[in-house]
Amino acid sequence: MLDKIMEMVGGDALNEMTSKAGISMDQAKEMLPLAQDSLQEGIMSQLTGGGDKEGLLGMFTSALGGGGGLMSNGIFGSIKGMFMKKIMTNMGLPESVAGLAAGSGLSSIVGGIAGKLSDDGDNDGIDMSNIMNVLGGGGGAAGLLGGLMGGSGGGLMDNLKDAAGGLLGGDDKKDDDNGGGGLLGNLLG
């Protein structure tokens, strides 16, 4: 689901990064997957193992309120730091440029996500159920977020079992529906 959201809000982030950090559009486009990875890592770390769910909620609510408090949010700062490090490591840009790109791009992305979270649900605000509905609805890492939080698919172990089953052959019903064998069976077939 985060992939789809990134597609929707990525254009604004690209414009912010090029105008504020003085980088080319191609460089900005190269940064978007790094931003997504950093955001997923940061969100996952807060939703698992005693993370700061209130701080995560605060990050999105402050982004919705114009972003003034966003820069002082510790989780945002941590995600921005990860993003900055990825920019410097993967693209070889200096810290000053990476910092401007990470700050402006991530602010735009988090603001866009906050808007999607606010649009979800009936409360015209953001709460943990909005975060799980928007970021936890779907496959991949976002789907895992829902499972970790006790979503409809069970917990982390159920998701790992399902993923392993899909790779190694899956369950009988899924095999019948998909032609059988999972990834391993398809590779061997």
Image (cartoon, rainbow, N blue to C red):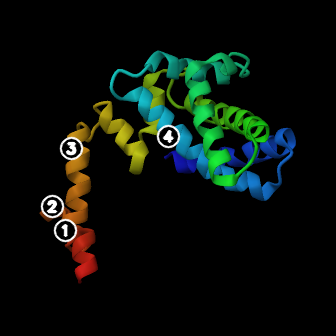
* Residue lying at the far left of the rendered structure: 172
Whole-angstrom CA distance, mark 4 to mark 2, is 29 Å
- Residue 78 appears left or right of 188: right
Give me the residue at 31% from left, 34% from top: 148
Residue 82 percent coordinates (x, y): 58, 37
Give yes or no for contact between labels 3 and 1 (Cβ–Cβ under 8 Å).
no
The residue pinned by badge 1 equals 175
The residue mark sitting in front, 4 or 3, is 4
Which numbered marker is on residue 8? none
Do tag 4 and tag 1 residues touch (Cβ < 8 Å)? no
Tags 1 and 2 in contact by the CB under 8 Å rule? yes
Q: Position of residue 4 (x, y in %)?
A: 56, 50
Q: Amino acid at mark 1?
A: Asp
The residue labelled by disc 4 is 40
Q: Earlier in the sequence, mark 4 or mark 3?
A: 4
Of residue 171 and residue 186, the one placed in the foreground of this image is 186
Q: Which mark is residue 158?
A: 3
> 70 left or right of 43?
right
Q: What's the distance in space between the residues labelled 2 and 3, CA to CA?
A: 13 Å
Look at mark 2 in the image and give the residue it sits on: 171
The residue at the point 42 percent across, 31 percent down is 45
Residue at image location 25% in from the left, 63% down from the top: 167
